[in-house]
Image (cartoon, rainbow, N blue to C red):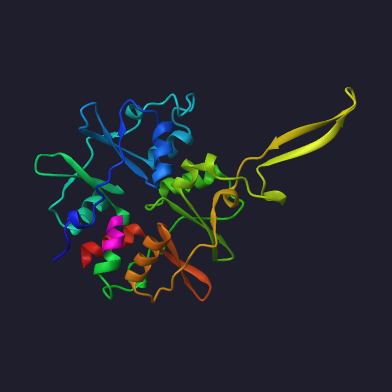
Amino acid sequence: MPPRVSSYMTTSLITVSVTDSLAHARRLMLRYGVGRLPVVDENERLVGILTVTDITEILSGKLTSKGLEEILVKEVYTPDPITIEQTRSIKSAAQLMLKYRIGGLPVVDYSRNLVGIITRTDLVRAYSERYKDEFKVAELMRREYAKARRDHNLYYILKLLSLDPAGKVIIEEDGRPVGVIAKRDLAFLATIPLPKGGKKKRVYKIRERDPIRDRVMTTRIYLAPIAEDVMTPNPITIDPNEDLAKAAEIMVRESIGVLPVVKEGTAVGVISKIEILKAITMA
């Protein structure tokens, strides 16, 4: 029998109010390493969910006339979220997440009170612990996936992120995976330090003499970031013949959401948390 939601849900909840700013919500996500926050009203009742995808959409063009301090959670959150009772099975949780294409579910008790949250990551951990030797990576891997080059601009990357089911883009070079970009990388872009040295910098400082004032001036030149600037380099990969539970274990241990599948040095597919959830529904 599949384990219950209560066995894998998180009960230490980080929530936001409908009147909090997106800047505050973003800081909470960064501080606690989460990608979604339950939204509560003044009576602490669950009214919605705010995800890292919501913040990414803001940064990619929606409501761009406002700063994140000016945008309130209530302007962008998803109201009336899909919930699950703590007594339901993790298979039911996986089915709901796949059906509604969501990454987490607020967990409620019989009285509909918020008691926790269960995410794709929690289910991946459950799979790594409970479903060894059920499937090989090759049986569930996705052969069609979002891929780009190091020099692709972020506008193109954003488009790929919106189309990929897992919200991940694999950066490849001659068929070899060299980096990964996730939605959270762009949502938290302002916190990523500038790469050091050479042409990778997004900001250059040029010192030159001003002929009129007869003194040295510093000019800053800002460059549009490209995929190489924000990707996580040297991604962990996995062989197609490896146990899928091993892939799940790596994802949990390394806090990553996708593994390029590599055979003889060439990428042949990907395994993401979505494929792990599908495996749970099939086991």
- Residue located at (27% from left, 46% from top): 12
Q: Position of residue 47 (x, y in %)?
A: 23, 33
In this orientation, does residue 187 appear?
Answer: yes
Quarter in which the C terminus is drawn: bottom left
Depth order, front residue of 179/98: 179
Q: Is residue 22 left or right of residue 222?
A: left
User: Residue 123: within the magenta?
Assistant: yes
User: Vertically, is 58 above or below 247?
Assistant: above
Left or right for 84, reference 251: left
Residue range (magenta): 122-126
Q: Quadrant of residue 108?
A: top left
> Where, by quadrant of the figure, is residue 175 drawn?
bottom right
> Residue 74, image x and y in percent?
32, 27
- Classify 238 as above or below 96: below
Relative image position of residue 123 (x, y in whole percent): 27, 58
Q: Which residue is most to the left?
A: 110
Total tally of numbered discs in the picture: 0
Residue 63: % across, % down:
44, 27
The stretch drawn in magenta includes residue 158: no
Q: Is residue 71 above or below residue 157?
A: above
Q: What secondary structure is the stretch in magenta mostly built from?
A: helix
